[in-house]
């Protein structure tokens, strides 16, 4: 995955290399210009020497002093020395052989001047000296002019190159800034928009159109926060529903208790007053028909009494659910608890259903026994209901358990709850070969009031209460469909071993 940091580092390194290269080129150019300036100084020194030579020549012609002649000879010798020292520079500037030609002219000039010194009155010799001296000065002046032009050209080229390089660097800096701004600003603007949506209550996941590792990690962290927010929001909604349900159930249960008590009392009184117990050996004396009707009435009264007691138990369960009971954690042998629960549900077990239990006797979980039994009652009862809907000779409910460690046990999809990685757990698995759970309903089965049973056959609270109890124990629960058919529930509870 690409990294924005590596791109920025690469760009800045490239710019650094470019600037260093530009500086190196500028230094080379400056060094070349310095060489030009030094060469120009040499030509200027030669030109100055020829001018001084001509000046003392004129003084000699005017005044005829021996001192002027000596100075002329000295500057002429100096000019020849400079000419021979800087032969290469002069040839590079004026072309091959320019220094040799100038040296020949200077030699003839010095010879003519020496001859004129021996015959000062000879005007023809003086004219030749002037012509040769003028030629030497003209050549020196031309060399100085060419050197100045070369130096100016070098300075102009250096200035032009420097401006071009600066323009290239500025363009690259602007282009880099634009590209980085696009790659940084757009994702940040998208995040700002999504954060405003979150602030307005819209928990929309963030999808950044950026392959950079930093923004991908940022989007993942943002989406994780959104998922956690959504989960907590659902938990709050569920808690509010549960609180409202508890208040409602508490009121309904108290309201039902009084009429149920009256019905039960009335049934007891009617049974005792209308049909008192007979002494041994005595009958009613009104024949078999009356005895049959009396038996029938007595049975109806007993049914009223038993159903009233059943309704009172249901109300008591509602009150237990609505109220807060103390949570008492203790080691609970799992095999014993499962066997006891199966005995309670013996009458609800459909004919032909095989129950297979594979739980080691020493496996124990840490929890509240009545609450855990309520979990088993709900799940086993649901499994029996599902198996009753299918007609197959091999209908089976398998209940197994094994010890494990969270994070190292076999994986299981859609585990919900509070299982902490690294904790020791007991995995309790209830698997049936019934019709299974429609895949589209799997995410909703632990929601309150959600049921797939017909109206009047389920309240939709069984699995929700199961989830709440498991979460209260610090465990987790998951549901899935088996590949071979049927549903499978896995409960992870803290181990007591």
Image (cartoon, rainbow, N blue to C red):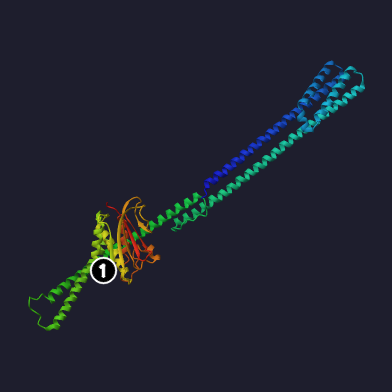
Residue 471 at x, y percent in the picture = 32, 56
| Residue 382 at least partly seen | no
The single residue placed furthest to the front in the displayed view is: 394
Give the percent coordinates (x, y) of residue 94.
79, 33
Q: Circle 1 sits in a helix, a strand or a loop, which is it?
A: helix
From the viewer's perspective, is residue 262 above or below residue 413?
below
Instruction: Residue at 82%, 19% (x, y): give it.
Output: 73
Considering only vertical position in the picture, is 175 above or below 361? above
**Residue carrying label 1:** 348
Task: Reply above or below: 120 against 139.
Answer: above
Identify which residue is drawn at 82% across, 26% down: 103
Residue visible at 81% across and 25% down in the picture: 50
Q: Can you give x and y, in whole percent of width and height, for residue 447 in the image?
A: 35, 63
Percent of width and height locating residue 38: 72, 29
| Image quarter of residue 110 | top right
- Residue 92 in the figure: left or right of residue 351: right
Instruction: Please tell me which residue lies in front, 169 or 65.
Output: 169
Neighbourhood count class around disc 1 (C-alpha, 10 Å): few under 14, some 14–19, many 20 upward = some
Return the residue found at the far top. 66
- Of 430 and 395, nearer the camera is 395
Q: Quadrant of residue 309?
A: bottom left
Residue 93 at least partly seen:
yes
Q: How many marks?
A: 1
Q: Along the horizontal axis of the image, is 181 left or right of 321?
A: right
């Amino acid at each position: 995955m690409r990294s924005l940091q590596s791109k920025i580092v690469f760009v800045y390194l490239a710019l650094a290399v470019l600037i260093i290269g530009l500086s190196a080129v500028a230094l080379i150019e400056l060094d070349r210009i310095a060489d030009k300036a030094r060469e120009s100084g040499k030509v200027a020194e030669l030109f100055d020497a020829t001018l001084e030579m001509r000046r003392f020549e004129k003084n000699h012609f005017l005044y005829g002093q021996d001192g002027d002649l000596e100075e002329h000879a000295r500057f002429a010798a100096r000019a020849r020395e400079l000419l021979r020292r800087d032969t290469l520079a002069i040839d590079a500037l004026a072309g091959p052989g320019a220094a040799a030609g100038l040296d020949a002219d200077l030699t003839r000039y010095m010879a003519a001047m020496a001859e004129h010194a021996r015959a000062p009155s000879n005007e023809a010799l003086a004219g030749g000296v002037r012509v040769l001296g003028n030629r030497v000065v003209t050549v020196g002046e031309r060399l100085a002019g060419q050197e100045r032009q070369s130096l100016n050209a070098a300075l102009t080229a250096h200035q032009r190159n420097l401006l071009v390089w600066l323009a290239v660097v500025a363009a690259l800096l602007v282009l880099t800034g634009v590209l980085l701004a696009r790659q940084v600003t757009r994702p940040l603007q998208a995040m700002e928009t999504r954060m405003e949506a979150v602030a307005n209550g819209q928990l929309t996941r963030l999808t950044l159109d950026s392959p950079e590792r930093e923004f991908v990690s940022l989007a993942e962290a943002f989406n994780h926060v959104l998922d956690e927010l959504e989960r907590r929001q659902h938990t709050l909604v569920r808690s509010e529903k549960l609180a409202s349900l508890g208040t409602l159930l508490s009121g309904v249960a108290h309201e039902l208790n009084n009429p149920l008590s009256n019905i039960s009392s009335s049934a007891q009184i009617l049974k005792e007053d209308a049909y008192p117990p007979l002494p041994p050996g005595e009958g009613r004396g009104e024949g078999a028909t009356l005895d049959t009707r009396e038996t029938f009435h007595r049975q109806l009264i007993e049914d009223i009494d038993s159903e009233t007691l059943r309704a009172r138990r249901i109300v008591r369960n509602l009150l237990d659910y609505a109220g807060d009971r103390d949570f008492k954690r203790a080691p609970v042998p799992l095999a014993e608890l499962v066997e006891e629960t199966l005995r309670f549900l013996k009458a609800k077990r459909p004919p032909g259903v095989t129950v297979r239990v594979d739980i080691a006797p020493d496996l124990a979980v840490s929890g509240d026994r009545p609450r855990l039994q309520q979990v088993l009652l709900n799940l086993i009862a649901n499994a029996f209901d599902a198996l009753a809907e299918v007609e197959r000779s091999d209908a089976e409910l398998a209940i197994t358990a094994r010890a494990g460690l969270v994070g190292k046990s076999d994986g299981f999809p859609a585990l919900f709850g509070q299982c902490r990685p690294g904790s020791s757990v007991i995995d309790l698995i209830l698997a049936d070969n019934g019709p299974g759970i429609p895949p589209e309903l799997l995410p909703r089965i632990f929601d309150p009031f959600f049921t797939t049973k017909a109206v009047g056959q389920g309240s939709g609270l069984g699995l929700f209460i199961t989830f709440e109890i498991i979460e209260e124990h610090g465990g987790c629960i998951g549901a899935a469909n088996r590949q071979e058919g049927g549903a499978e529930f896995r409960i992870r509870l803290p181990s007591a071993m």
